[in-house]
Image: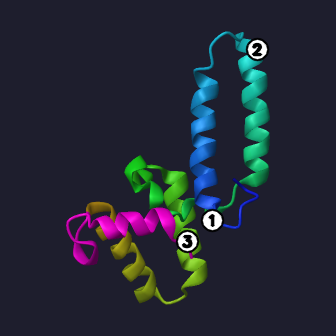
Amino acid sequence: MVDSALLVIGKIYYNMFEIQEKIKNFPGITSAQRHELYQSFVNRWTMLHTDLHSADPEYVSMAQNTNEEVMNGFYHVVENLYQDTEDQVAIATQLTQFRSGHGIFGFGRPVAKAAASQCQPG
């Protein structure tokens, strides 16, 4: 995934979340093995993670808005890219509209959802 020509930073965040869940439920290993595997995962995640991982709209159905780490990362990216508060508010509003399928994204338009999975963040 990371060797592709596409920008996949948000997808990496989602995949790392999935790996974490699989480690929690991985059958046939002892508690000590699970802890060792989880610690390796945490060490790698700590090395890889940036706020940009939070900026991919494709995974809005994964309740990004309820994840404090994700939302803090998203807003940190917005604040760094857009200094004007009005621009920041417009982006926050558009994210809410996209998540709910309202406004310019009216009724969960299929094109908006398709674009989220195919367009590059940024």
Q: CA distance from mark 3 to mark 1?
A: 9 Å
Q: Residue beneath label 2, please?
A: 32
Verify CB contact (< 8 Å) between mark 3 and mark 1: yes
User: Is 87 drawn above or below residue 71 in the view shown?
Assistant: below
Circle 2: residue type: Ala
> Residue at point 79% right, 41% down?
43
Nearest to N terminus: mark 3 or mark 1: 1
Percent x, y of residue 90: 37, 82
Q: CA distance from mark 2 to mark 3?
A: 39 Å
Nearest to N terminus: mark 2 or mark 3: 2
Discs 2/3, front: 3
Magenta-drawn segment: 101-122
Q: Residue beneath label 3, please?
A: 121
Q: Quadrant of residue 30?
A: top right
> Residue at point 26% right, 65% down?
101
Percent x, y of residue 70: 53, 56
Circle 1: residue type: Leu
